[in-house]
Image (cartoon, coloured by chain):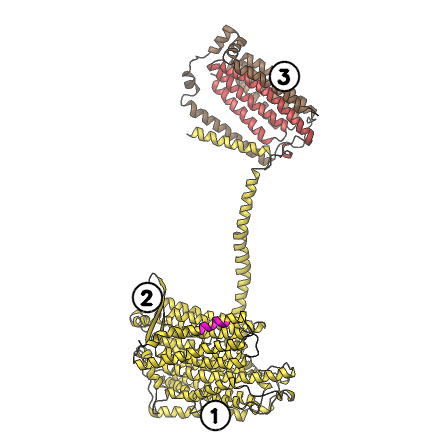
Chain colours: A brown, B yellow, C red
Amino acid sequence: MREVLFWGFAGMAIISAFLCVTRRSAVSSALWLVSTLFDLAAIYVLLDAQFIAAMQVLVYAGAIMVLFLFVIMLLNLGREGPGDLKGWGGRIVATALAVGLVVELWALKAALAGEGGFQAVTAAYPLPEGTVAGMAEAQGVVGLIADTLFRQYLVPFEITSVLLMAAVVGAVVLAKRKL
Amino acid sequence: MPGIVGWVWLVVLLPFIGFLVNGALSFLRPRAKDAVSIVGVGSVALAFVLSVAMALALAGSHAEEGFVVTIWRWIHVGDLEIDLAFQVDALSVIMLLVVTGVGLLIHIFSVGYMKADDAYPRFFAYLNLFVFFMLVLVLGAAFPIMFVGWEGVGLCSYLLIGFWYAEKANADAGKKAFIMNRIGDFGFLIAMFMIFGATGSLAYHEVFAAAPSAFVVDGNSITLVTLFLFLGCTGKSAQIPLYTWLPDAMAGPTPVSALIHAATMVTAGVYLIARTNVLFAMASVSSVVVASVGAVTALWAASIALKQWDIKKVLAYSTISQLGYMFLAVGVGAIASGVFHLVTHAFFKALLFLGAGSAIHAMHHAYHATHTHDDAQDMRNMGGLRRWMPWTAGVMWIATLAIAGVPGFSGFFSKDEILAMTFARGHEDMVFYVLWFVGTLAALMTAFYMTRMMLYTFHGPNRTGASEQQHLHEVPWVMTGPLVVLAAGSILAGVMNLPEVLPFHGWLHQWLEPVTAQGDFYRREMHLTAGTEWLLLVLATVIAAAGIVGAYRLLRPADLLPAREAEPETGFGLVLLRKYYIDELYDTVVVRPLVWLSEKILWKGVDAGAIDGAGVHGAANVTRGLGAIGSWLQSGQLGTYVFIFVIGVVVLLRAMSGS
Amino acid sequence: MLLGPALGLSAILFTIGVAGVMIRRNAIVIFMCVELMLNAVNLTFVAFAQQFGPEGQVIVFFVMAVAAAEAAVGLAIILAIFRHRETVDLRDINMLRG
């Protein structure tokens, strides 16, 4: 069942991403990106990362993309602009490079994972399959993350908050008309 | 080796020093004419004195083969070893005396002739340079050294023909001479390569010693070598087909015509064949070719001279004709006869040119005084000049009688001997009788046109014009002096090689034995009975008389009109006047196609198109293109940067997954 | 067992994002493609987290936070540039030109 759902959402994600990249209107691109984000959120759920899925929808789709749309509207870029995509030559080259990239990534995976595919890799590591699901059963999904976040990764957490504050201040300063 | 012979390099060096000094003076003190005269004449005079000393030393030493004086190592590359060496032997000493002796007289004449010219120092500088190169040519002990002199005299010929270079015609004449010479030089070079290939050396004594074993007698190799050598001779000595530069070379000052184009440079070809007579003796086909070309050229040029009006052109064609006789001589194997005629011709032809120069000088004077612009060299403007220039007329008559072959004068003996030797070979091959006939016919014409020249110039009524006449006068002693000396030589030089039927005969023949001995081995003996010889002598006299008397009778100097009033020529006379249209033929067949080729193909196609386009501009364009690609990397366009980014990532991944 | 396909999907999404960055000229859209790339990476982390423990999800947490900050600042910059240049077309913004 999971597999079927996964393939479905994966296909939709790919289509949405492709459309996002190729639309002329910036608003259309933004909306297709939102679609992609939703599909990814669904996949996160299938991968036992429910909290992350929720965060994805809340933060990414809900805040970041809204911000994008605000800016697009502010700059009045919603209309179908004059070809914002590069010419045919650029597209061909970009496609070729993209294909190359995929091939290389696959080759990298083949080289690193060795003969047995990922199963061999993961077999060498401590957690048996389905463990995260089991841990989530015990602590709850959020608790699982919180436990790791506030114990092992406390310092990065604090620094991230400083980063966010810097970002806010910076954004305000940059976007002001007059300092 | 006698001590003085070791100083032979000084003979060569003296004129060169004269060139350097006069050349410097032409830049620094162009008006110092006296200093230039002293240096110019003095250097050649000293060289002449040394040459006489060399000759006496050689004669006294009884060393048959002569001496080779090596100066220094020159080219030692692989198997090729050439040293700078001078050869003092029977033949080179004769040439040495002619070059320095006649050269000295002409230098003295030039002091007077060129006195009014602003480029006086340059003239003597070039003249000295010429003497230097000519001496290198005749004294060289190896082919390359001779070739240095060969090229050098060609260069000086170009410089001196175009001496008054401001006139385009003079510059063109100089170019024509040089370029035609180069065609001949190509032949000379090929011959040198072949000689080196066959014998492994280029020094005379080594080549001639190796020749019998290196070449098959009458084989293809030796025939080709000698024919290529002869090609060089046709260029330098103005024989068919490369003779058309010589009449044009008359654009140079008359002393130049006398020295270079009469007495010395043009005889270099004869000297070459005399020096390499062994090779020619081994190639009978080439020898016949040489003789035939010589005889035909003699007749051809003589016929053209019959109708020329410019006095210097008459003498130019006469020179070509007489050179033909010399080649006829060396072609049939009479080396000493050829050299003999070379010597006598040097005397009387130099005399003729200098005398004509005196006449032209006087005419120029007259025209200058009356501001007339007629041609001072056209015989139709002259006439009766002996009234004002008795000495010049007198010595010119001596020279005319010599060249016409009047008995007692030197030309008679030398020309008769050539024809006699040709006749002597007739019994082995009919072609020699034909050549003898051609030569005799040319002798008849020679006597005729020379007398014609004298009649029109020095006799008959004067056509220069009444006002100009008053300004005609004899030339100064500095110019008539050398003429007298040359006249004496024209008479006395005959003694050098009297015919066998006379006592004290064949002195030059014996003197040149060491040079001709090796070749004589391959040659048939040329012997005439006493009776035949006397018959030929009488015949030669009759021919000369016929020519002279015929000219007297048939020509009417009184009927001539000055050049500007003269009627145009018609018929065969026009063909002769226009030199059988050979120049026009060469122009159409050779010159124009070459110019077209050079311009359209080699210039526009290869040079501008390929080399400039692909090479020069191509390199620039490639650089520019590469630069354009490079500048794309710095475009400031983020898209480009990302693009390159991604390429880098892909490459890295490949590297990672590959290893 | 979803690890392999998830990673494959991640690679494809990442590549699409890269292609988007290369072919688009509008600065904002390029930004969105960068976000797409970041999401692809998030997917990788989550997929591995399913096998190896919650650390992966924590990292995704941080990625999201940083992405948010980056989006804010980046869009502010774009706004500032737009004020100067009246355009967000990257062709016209070549002040890095050397």
What is the quadrant of residue B570 in the picture?
A: bottom right
Q: Residues within 10 Å of mark 3 (few under 14, many from 20)?
A: few
Disc 1 residue type (three-letter): Ala
Q: For mark 3, name the chain.
A: A
Q: Percent x, y for residue C59?
A: 52, 17
Residue B95 visible to an observer of this rendering? no
Q: Which residue is mark 2?
A: B200
Numbered mark located on residue B152 in the image: none
Residue range of the region highlighted in magenta in the rendering: B15-22
Q: Percent x, y for residue B655?
A: 45, 31
Q: Which residue is mark 1?
A: B546
Q: Quadrant of the N terminus of chain B?
A: bottom left
What is the quadrant of residue B170 in the picture?
A: bottom right
Q: Which mark is in front, 3 or 2?
A: 2
Structural distance between the alpha carbons of marks 1 and 3: 133 Å
- Give the SS element for disc 1: helix
Count of numbered circles on the image: 3
Q: Earlier in the sequence, mark 1 or mark 2?
A: 2
Disc 3 residue type (three-letter): Gly
Residue placed farthest to the top in the image?
A138
Q: Residues within 10 Å of mark 2 (few under 14, many from 20)?
A: some
In the image, is A15 to the left or to the right of B321?
A: right
**Residue in front for this viewpoint, B241 or B317:** B317
Q: Residues within 10 Å of mark 1 (few under 14, many from 20)?
A: some
Q: For mark 1, name the chain.
A: B
Residue B51, above or below A36: below
Numbered mark located on residue A62 in the image: 3
